[in-house]
Amino acid sequence: MSNFEDWARATYRQAGIEVDENELVLVELIYAGALGQLEMLDRIDLEAFPARGVDLRHAPKAT
Amino acid sequence: MTHPQDLSLRQQAEAIRHGDLSAKELLDATLERLRSRDSSINSTPVVFDELSQAQISQAPAGPLFGVPITVKDMFALPWRAARNGTTHNLIPASASGPYRNLRDAGVIVVGIANQHELGIGSTGIYSAYGPMRNPWDPLHCAGGSSGGSAGGVAARLVAGSLASDSGGSTRIPASYCGVVGLKLTYGAVPYDGYFGAATTFSAPGLVARDGGDARMLTAAMLQRPFPLQSGSGLRVGLVREPFWNDVQAEAADACTKALTSTGWKVSEVKIENLELAGAAFLGRLIAEAGIPPTDVFATLSEPTRALLLAGMLAPARFVPRADRVRAAVRYSLAAAFETVDFLAWPTTPGAAPTIDEPWVTIPSGRVLVDVPNVRQNSLANLTGAPAISIPVGLSSAQLPVGLQLLGPWGSEARLLDAAEHVERVSDRAYVNLVPPLAR
């Protein structure tokens, strides 16, 4: 079993979810794609992206 | 004689108001059409024969008195739980907030609009009720997640439908089926009894055949008048990369042609940090998605299960960063609206793909259609802003293509004005196109 499979199975076991091998292949594919996109967030400069409140109902308040 | 469901929604309302058509006659004709026409597209798997008749006597004399609509499976009704495209009752039967607003305008809920399972998909292929097929060609998907709403309206089964939109779920099927789809500003209506309450991305959506009908539904939903204003002289911003450059040429060409005819002042616009918007959308969405109860999870299709399972593994460290980017992109969008009235680009990267092969070939490669579909639409959901998809013609395969307009928070009125302006300058050439199933 690969590291991914070990890790994923352990995670799902804790949640009481059974997965088969075919399912894990698809999950790994999706996860790899998502992670590739999400890792862009690791590279942001936190000073350039301050934590700010968000009220989605309205335009952001002028700074 | 014209079948009542070949009338527009506002013509239906007016005919009832003037006594030219009774609510019962309209309902009977609608039920007959649902029975005779829906089997080939599967837009409305649950029809309320007796319950809809009973609604007529209880409906208030509002502006939409007696007008039949469908409601997406994501909204609870007093007599039916919301199932969200699954086999399970996920929100108990109750009068959901969006339903209440439409009910108070006098609509008759004639059936449940099919939807992509849990709303997680832009094709409408996976649903406990079976796939939604496109009225323009049943081999092609109707889009998702609100495929039943768009397909049913396009096929002239009903003239309006209550949909929802968490990443394009109203606009994408509207584009694929050749109808108008409006995503409201986040939080514009009460969210109780609606799955949108579980995510910060979702907003109710409205599907209609043209801007005038969408305006009536919007007025009912938001419970205030939306008088028609001129849609001329507006300023529209184009965001070339990736929204225009990474789509099929015929989608971009149809949208360009429609925009050119409007006389609007068109300029190129840059949205700061847009390249991070997709990651922010994904990072926050995964955190909000969660896993349904085990008995529900066991019934889901393989792709939906895999998406949810993959999301479970995503590290939590991305969530606060996604929120920082989300806040920044909202400021970037607000800055863009200082120079333009709205932004425009193709709603989808191309026309509806087939159900057997839901992929699309675009300049960046051949990909599952969900990926560019969400990319083209999620900015509105990330920021909370409203957006509309309007039909602007047919592809070479005779399938509809949609143009998306994204406006500032609370700008539904202007988006509707813009939609009707496009209809006027095109002599209604696009909204009057009728799918083969409805001819």
Image: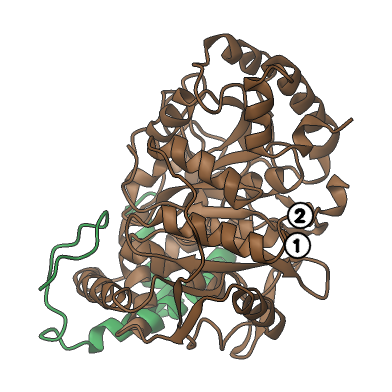
Chain colours: A green, B brown
Q: Amino acid at mark 2?
A: Asn
Label 2 SS = loop
Circle 2 residues within 10 Å: few <14, some 14–19, many ≥20: some
Find residue B21 and report its horizontal and vertical position in percent. Answer: 73, 20
Q: Is residue B275 left or right of residue B37?
A: left
Q: Chain of mark 1?
A: B
What residue is disc 1 on?
Answer: B429
Q: Residue at x 16, y 88 (%)?
A: A45
Residue B330 shows in this picture? yes
Q: Amino acid at mark 1?
A: Ala
Find residue A27 and report its horizontal and vertical position in percent. Answer: 49, 69
Find residue B297 and report its horizontal and vertical position in percent. Answer: 48, 46
Label 1 SS = loop
What residue is disc 2 on?
Answer: B432
Q: Chain of mark 2?
A: B
Task: In the rendered structure, find residue B332 and report the number of the disc placed on it.
Answer: none
Residue B300 shows in this picture? no
Image-quadrant location for residue B288 = bottom left
Image-quadrant location for residue B197 = top left
